[in-house]
């Protein structure tokens, strides 16, 4: 009995081994959980159930990223934050989409993009340096899509008067808060130092997004088009400010071509795709 007791004490006091899931196994688990979540989200009857589903999915993601192997701990946190923004945006867009074809496209995109974010995680520290730059761009992509979904969701709430007792200006402020926080986050991710300039740029971004949200909401266009235009504007302003905050500054010769191309595409978008009310 004494030997058994000593063995039990030794076993309990020994450090547990690190348990890490292979990223590809995590990708399969993530795909399974997302399929289950999407099957449920189309049958929700109230916003309370939406919140329960959303926070339950975040908890499961938190557990999954906690057990998945990452070369650096900071990457785990960044990946989770990108998934949080991405899922909130996609869930809101799915809830306010009533066209079956668009719904299936959104769901498929959600499953694939989330799956890839786990599948291509490096399985060793040796692969980390090669992996980091493209994976940062991938996280920026899913975060931007998540922002688009959040802005579409906010515009849909205003458009359909889901919470008609809430003043429209509060939704414009929320739009500006989310947009400026996302801008600040990704300026920092791309190496902009936490100096006075980045905080001034974020404050200016906040004011500009309030004005844009107010103007776009007043236009006779639908909720999805409004959200997409806001996101498009967000990206262009964010990109120019990102270059402006660096030591090199904006290379106007290169960016002028980019802006003119965007202006042409934007005009085609307004004429041929947007349905005016």
Image: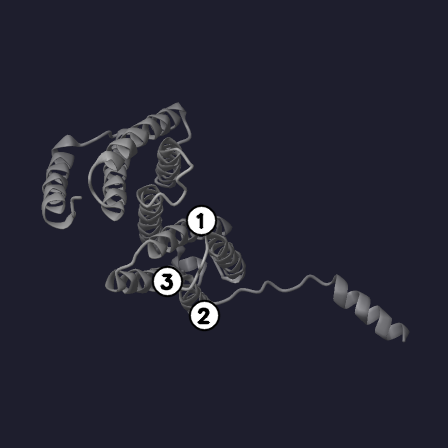
Q: Is residue 39 above or below residue 174?
A: below
Q: Is residue 116 above or below residue 3?
A: above
For the point 80% across and 69% down, which residue is it? 8
Residue nearer the viewer, 56 or 199: 56
For the point 51% across and 66% down, which residue is it? 21
Return the residue at label 1: 81
Mark 1 element type: helix
Return the residue at label 2: 25
Question: In the rendering, at what x and y percent does residue 184 appear?
Answer: 38, 35
Mark 3 element type: loop
State the image quarter where residue 236 is shown. Answer: top left
Q: Sequence order check: which comes first, mark 3 or mark 1?
A: 1
Residue nearer the viewer, 1 or 238: 238
Q: Nearer the viewer, mark 3 or mark 1?
A: 1
For the residues marked 3 and 2, what is the alpha-carbon distance in whole angstroms? 11 Å
Q: Does residue 246 show up? A: no
Return the residue at label 3: 120
Quadrant into which the C terminus falls: top left
Quadrant into which the N terminus falls: bottom right
Q: Sequence order check: which comes first, mark 1 or mark 2?
A: 2
Residue nearer the viewer, 29 or 250: 29
* Crowd class of label 3 (few under 14; some 14 to 19; many from 20; radius 10 Å): few
Q: Is residue 247 above or below residue 62?
A: above
Question: In the rendering, at what x and y percent does residue 86 appear?
Answer: 38, 52
Q: Sequence order check: which comes first, mark 3 or mark 2?
A: 2
């Amino acid at each position: 009995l004494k030997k058994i007791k000593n063995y039990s004490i030794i076993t309990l006091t020994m450090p547990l081994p690190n348990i890490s899931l292979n990223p590809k196994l995590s990708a399969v688990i993530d795909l399974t959980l997302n399929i289950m979540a999407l099957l449920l989200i189309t049958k929700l009857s109230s916003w309370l159930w939406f919140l329960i589903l959303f926070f339950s999915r975040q908890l499961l993601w938190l557990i999954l990223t906690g057990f998945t192997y990452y070369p650096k701990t900071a990457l785990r946190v960044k990946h989770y934050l990108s998934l949080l923004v991405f899922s909130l945006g996609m869930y809101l867009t799915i809830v306010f989409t009533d066209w079956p074809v668009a719904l299936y496209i959104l769901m498929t995109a959600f499953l694939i993009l989330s799956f890839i974010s786990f599948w291509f995680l490096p399985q060793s520290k040796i692969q980390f340096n090669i992996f980091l730059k493209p994976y940062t761009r991938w996280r920026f992509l899913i975060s931007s899509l998540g922002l688009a979904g959040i802005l579409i969701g906010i515009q849909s709430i205003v458009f359909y008067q889901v919470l008609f007792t809430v003043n429209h200006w509060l939704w414009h402020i929320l739009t500006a808060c989310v947009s400026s926080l996302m801008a600040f986050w990704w300026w920092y991710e791309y190496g902009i130092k936490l100096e006075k300039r980045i905080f001034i740029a974020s404050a200016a971004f906040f004011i500009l997004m309030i004005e844009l949200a107010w103007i776009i909401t007043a236009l006779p266009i639908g909720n999805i088009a409004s959200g997409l235009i806001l996101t498009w504007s967000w990206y262009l302003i964010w990109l120019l400010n990102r270059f402006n905050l660096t030591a090199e500054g904006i290379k106007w010769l290169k960016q002028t071509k980019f802006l003119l191309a965007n202006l042409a595409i934007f005009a085609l978008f307004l004429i041929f795709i947007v349905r005016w009310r």
